[in-house]
Every structure is written in structure tokens, then in C-alpha cells.
Image: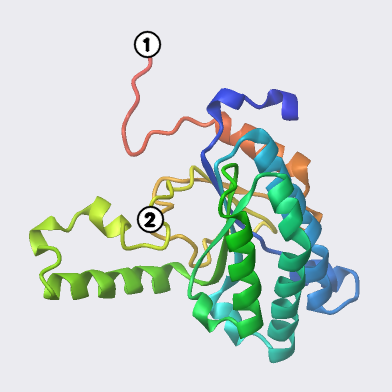
Amino acid sequence: MKDLIDINHLPKHIAVIMDGNGRWAKKQGAKRIFGHRNAVEAVRQTTETCAELGIKHLTLYAFSTENWNRPKLEVRGLMELLVSTIKKETSTLTKNNVRLTSIGDTSALPKNCQQELKESMELTKNNDGLNLILALSYSGRWEILKAVKDLLKDVKNDTIGFEDVNYDLFSDYLCTKNIPDPELLIRTSGEMRISNFLLWQIAYTELYITDILWPDFRKEHLYEAIVAYQKRERRFGKVIEKEI
């Protein structure tokens, strides 16, 4: 499948809703955290493959604001897994010239998570290959509401004028400032919903839904998604006339 990819027509930014860990664990007769642990390999292969192909940005929906409502034991397990994974993978990120960044309300994370994340981002900040963006304690509605509040504050303080507000200016108040909108959004597990992810940014993003559960997602599945993306005609609301 890799040989079908046009390297001159790669998406600059791929976003992934990593879904299906709980169902994967249930199939194994195990607890949900078992699925989360076994999803680390999918993250590793997806990140390394994007870096190898030359993708510029990869955003992984790692933990939503709604996920805080899950059972406390599962949330604690997820936070512990996040800390241990970041510790283990930082050297690999550097080896692959990957820069780690994050979006979301990371101040809500446990202190040890915040510290590990901060240290890894500092250690990888000079890498100029793939930008790996972890969406942590993130949701699209939270992001948009925060942007509106920050923008209104600047209008009130006369930092900007009301007449200056437009799409580009508003985008500068989002977590993804200076990051291009995703051209491709992949969702695993077959669910047909956005789940409050990058609501502003995916206005014209191509969606790719696969029935593969996230712990089973491998580089071949990523290749398939990219090939499917490259076969599509992106119109951005326009009608493209073809010669007869």
C-alpha cells in the first residue's frame, strides 16, 4: 500500500480520534485500562510512520475534557500510563526528529503529568521534523469558548477593534495558532461522530472512518487512509468544472 502513496500530495496535518480501546479490552476479557496500555504501539507506529513520510503535523486526541467523567480508577490509570509513556518515548522522539507539543487545558492534569509533558516538550523543542500534538484535557467547545473570552477581553481592553475580528484573527486565539488545519481526520472503531474534536479546524477536513479498533491500528492502516485521501477531490465548497 505504501507504494501507492504520492509523496508530492501528502496532507500537511493529520488528526486522529483514537477510539476503541475499551471495546478491544472487552474482547480480550480484560479491563479498559488493558486496552489503553496496548494502544501505545498504535501511537508509536502512527507517529514514526508520519515522521518517515514527511508529514508536518500529527494531532492525537489523547484525553478529552469529557473523559474526566470516566471512573476514577480508569482516569488514574490513564494518567499513570501517560507519564510512563512520555518518559519512555522521549528519546525515540528525538531520534526521529519529532517535536512534542500539546493543546488543551493541561493545567487540569496531575502535577506529575504536567512535569513530564513539560520536560519532554523542552527536550524536543529544537526538533524540526514532525510536530506531534497531544490533545490533552481538550474539547472543541472548550477551545472555542476560551477563544471567544480571550478575544472579548482584548476588545474590551482596546487591544483590537471589533471591526478587526475575522476568521484569521479568531484562529489566532485557538490552541492551534500557527498550525494548519488538518486535511485528513482518521477515526478508528467505526463510530460516525466527531466527539467534540477540533470543531473549528475541521470545517473542510476529509474524514476517514475505519472499523479497526485503535490498539490494532498499524502503519498499513495509515497508508490506506492516506491513499484514500489522495483519491478525493477537495472542493472547499466550490464546483470544479471538468473538461469534456
Residue beneath disc 1: 243
Residue 216 vertical position relative to residue 108 in the rendered view, above or below: above
* Residue occupying the far right of the picture: 29
Q: Say whether disc 1 or disc 2 marks the residue closer to the N-terminus.
A: 2
Which amino acid lies under the numbered mark 1 shown in the image of this protein?
Answer: Glu
Q: Is residue 105 visible?
A: yes
> Is 171 positioned to the left or the right of 216 in the image?
left
- Could you say where residue 63 lies in the image, as x and y percent from the top left? 60, 71
Residue 240 vertical position relative to residue 242 in the rendered view, above or below: below
Query: How many badges with numbers are in the image?
Result: 2
Residue beneath disc 2: 177
Q: Residue at x 63, y 36 (%)?
A: 226
Which amino acid lies under the numbered mark 2 shown in the image of this protein?
Answer: Lys
Q: Where the N terminus falls, by quadrant?
A: top right
Circle 1 crowding by C-alpha within 10 Å: few under 14, some 14–19, many from 20: few
Q: Residue 113's image quarter?
A: bottom right
Q: Is residue 211 visible?
A: no
Residue 136 vertical position relative to residue 14 in the rendered view, above or below: below
